[in-house]
Amino acid sequence: MNIVDAKVIVTCPGRNFVTLKLTTEDGISGVGDATLNGRELAVASYLRDHVCPLLVGRAADQIEDTWQYLYRGGYWRRGPVTMTAIGAVDVALWDIKAKVAGLPLYQLLGGRSRVGVTVYGHANGGSIPELLEEVARYLDAGYRAVRVQCGIPGIDSTYGVSGDKLFYEPAHGARPAETTWSSERYLRFIPKVFDAVRVKHGFDFHMLHDVHHRLTPIEAARLGKSVEEYALFWLEDPIAEELQEGFRIIRRHTTTPLAVGEVFNSIWDCHLLIAEQLIDYIRTNATHAGGVTHVRRIFQLADLHHVRTGSHGATDLSPVSLAASLHIDLSVPNFGIQEYMRHSALTDEVFPHAYRFEDGYLHPGEVPGLGVDIDEQLAARFPYNTAYLPVIRLVDGAMHDW
Ligand code: KDG
Ligand code: MG
């Protein structure tokens, strides 16, 4: 059963998404998410110009061989653009294989290991009182885990805090927005945020927080140590992550659990973090880290070293990506938690899907394959719209990690 068509669909139903759709000679199609926020067209071109011509005529059922062909065969390995492109092909092929089998994908990955996929929602507020109200909203809606992000006095814009409480969308405009950052102010204020949340809402739910790569290892160590009493489920991306050895410093000083990996694109970005048990949760996702095939390899390595999963699930990953994560989450033994930011109603219309939220869990559904499609006619009505992620500078004007 050969692939006869490989199509790249770029659409912007409120935000940009790139989708790869593969079709076989039997008329079965599969989809993969190829969205790389702020660099979407680079992946679209990589696929259109360099990968799609190689896929037509290949056997759709040889997933591992196709992965190796694109990874080893490209000579220039790894990197977000390459691995997102390979990931889209891989996920689309798994979608096809599961449809041919007539089974939801998780059945091909070993079957169900749990009743549902525990997800965390995103509560954010410009101030502590506003955040406390948002946390209440998530708990009332049945969430068992909530990420808390709060505005920091004296800093004009903080990661994860938005005016629109339903949808957090940091990518905007023809040039990156610029704001100012102060780690000193953040470090002074953020323990008060965790304290207020625990005082108001107690300890009977998982509380998470994303630092978004902004601290140095010793600052992160101090933060982790100073907030141990609030029992965070995890402290996410405390530092820029290129230097895996940097985590040894944090680990030496605190028992606050650490989660990293949304910007990683291969096992080589995290093998030391995992093998040395420097982290507790690995957040790689099938879209940016080479598809179901490669993410499962990372998660299996993690399982050997008591590291659990926590896949990235921001809204710049399409519903195709979320569905792929859910099938993996449901089946792997070392699942930890899944990020869940709701997509807009328009995005959900462009990507009709079978997954559903109930009682704090997401369920991928029982439809054969991923259980997600793309409405190509509707998608065509929303052309690509340039949008960059923001950048930040320190008070003295120096560039910092957003
Ligand atoms: O494109 C960047 C976003 O995916 C990222 O900023 C979201 O940090 C993020 C998260 O944890 O979802
Ligand atoms: Mg994050």
Image (spheres, rainbow, N blue to C red):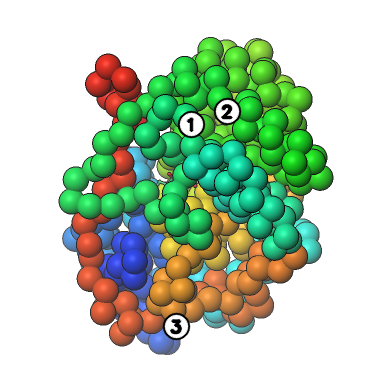
What residue is disc 1 on?
Answer: 152
List the single residue furthest toward the front: 129
In x, y percent, where is residue 355? 60, 72
Above or below, comparing residue 265 to residue 101 in the picture: above
In x, y percent, where is residue 273? 57, 27
* 3 or 1: tag closer to the N-terminus: 3
Residue occupying the point 64% across, 40% down: 208
* 3 or 2: tag closer to the N-terminus: 3
For the residue carrying disc 2, how many other residues have a C-alpha within 10 Å: few (<14), some (14-19), or many (20+)? Answer: some
What's the distance in space between the residues labelled 3 and 2, CA to CA?
A: 51 Å
Return the residue nearer the eye: 267 or 307. Answer: 307
Q: Quadrant of the C terminus?
A: top left
Q: Quadrant of the N terminus?
A: bottom left
Q: State yes or no: discs 1 and 2 in contact (Cβ < 8 Å).
A: yes
Residue 28 image label = 3
| Amino acid type indicated by mark 1 | Ile
